[in-house]
Amino acid sequence: MIVFFTGTGNSRFIAEKLAEFTGDETFDIFESVRTGKGHTFTEEGPYIFIAPVYVAAPAQCLTDFIKRSEFPKNSKAYFIMCCAASMSASPVFCMNIASEKGFEYKGTAPMIMPQNYITYFKADSEEICRDKIKNAPESIREISEYIKAGKDLPQTKISNFEYRMTVPVLNLYCKYFMKSKAFHVTDKCIGCGKCVSLCPFGNISLKDNKPVWGSKCTHCMACISMCPTEAIEYGKLTKGKPRYHGPYSYNS
Ligand SMILES: Cc1cc2nc3c(=O)[nH]c(=O)nc-3n(C[C@H](O)[C@H](O)[C@H](O)COP(=O)(O)O)c2cc1C
Ligand code: SF4
Ligand code: SF4
């Protein structure tokens, strides 16, 4: 069973490709993130959890979802961390949640995909996006071989210091920088409501046919990246910056 969270589609792309190789079903946690509910899984493992890396750690909505869900005891758990450059201390977070939920931890693999964090960084160039997406299936196939053979994924060494540093930085970052207050629309907005339906937290509503943002935001970048008219900006930080429209826009 492949369980995934995605903001801009990279993790979905990995989940779907992996399913082609392993024959597993996929489960998108979008609805559960919206409702704040968990899920009771009864399927025999292995469970493969896929999510973007947010600030050197797995997206918190995935780990929160795992915490509030039920899984058969002693199932095997694999993790795939979708990142633009490095999964950093993510394996330690994955190992901890696996142990808390009684999984047999089978390792964490990084998957390098295009950068989507355009509020504070720049999206990768078209060429880099194409390369990353073109190379992804081979890396996913390699990961699938470990899963099909029931083997542990190769270990990445993370120092205890790196993990201990990540936790306070992550907490401060979430408190002070992962905010939706700076999101606003320009007059390019056509009131289509796509941003409303894409937000995993249900944080956006339409008022007078224009989106307004509430206070629950994980900076997944779905709204700003997928707006069909590129009408969404984040303060002045995104003005003139190219958007990342997701892996499926590079299929041709
Ligand atoms: C809030 C946020 C934090 C991020 N932090 C990191 C990071 O620490 N390291 C990294 O390599 N990529 C980081 N990224 C980039 C994403 O992990 C990467 O683009 C990923 O492929 C997005 O997956 P998705 O399309 O499934 O949402 C971050 C992106 C966001 C939105
Ligand atoms: S997706 Fe873009 S155009 Fe559509 S309502 Fe949201 S901001 Fe406006
Ligand atoms: S408001 Fe935008 S960036 Fe924040 S969680 Fe919703 S879709 Fe993601």
Image: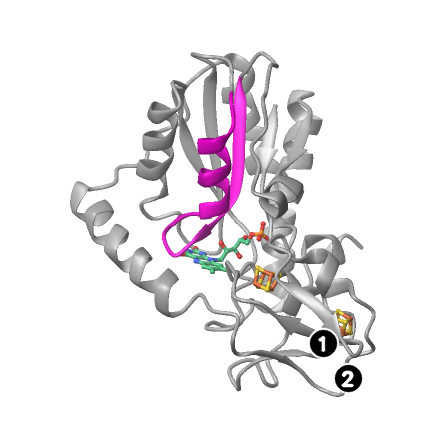
Give ligand 2's quarter of the image: bottom right
Residue 19, position as x, y percentages in the image: 67, 28
Look at the image and tell me in which quarter the N terminus lies. top right
Does the magenta-highlighted stretch encompass residue 83?
no
Which mark is first along the chain, 1 or 2?
2
Q: Residue at x 71, y 79 (%)?
A: 231
What amino acid is at disc 2? Lys
| Residue under label 2 | 188
Q: Is residue 48 magenta?
A: yes
Q: Which mark is residue 21?
A: none
Mark 1 closeness class: few <14, some 14–19, many ≥20 residues within 10 Å: some
On screen, residue 5 above or below 186: above
Query: What range of the chain is rendered magenta?
Result: 46-70
Mark 2–mark 1 contact, CB under 8 Å?
yes
User: Residue 134, percent across and down?
Assistant: 65, 48
- Tell me what residue is drawn at x 30 percent, y 62 percent: 172
Q: Secondary structure at mark 2?
A: loop
- The colour scheme used to paint the residues is one colour
Residue 161 drawn above or below residue 100 = below
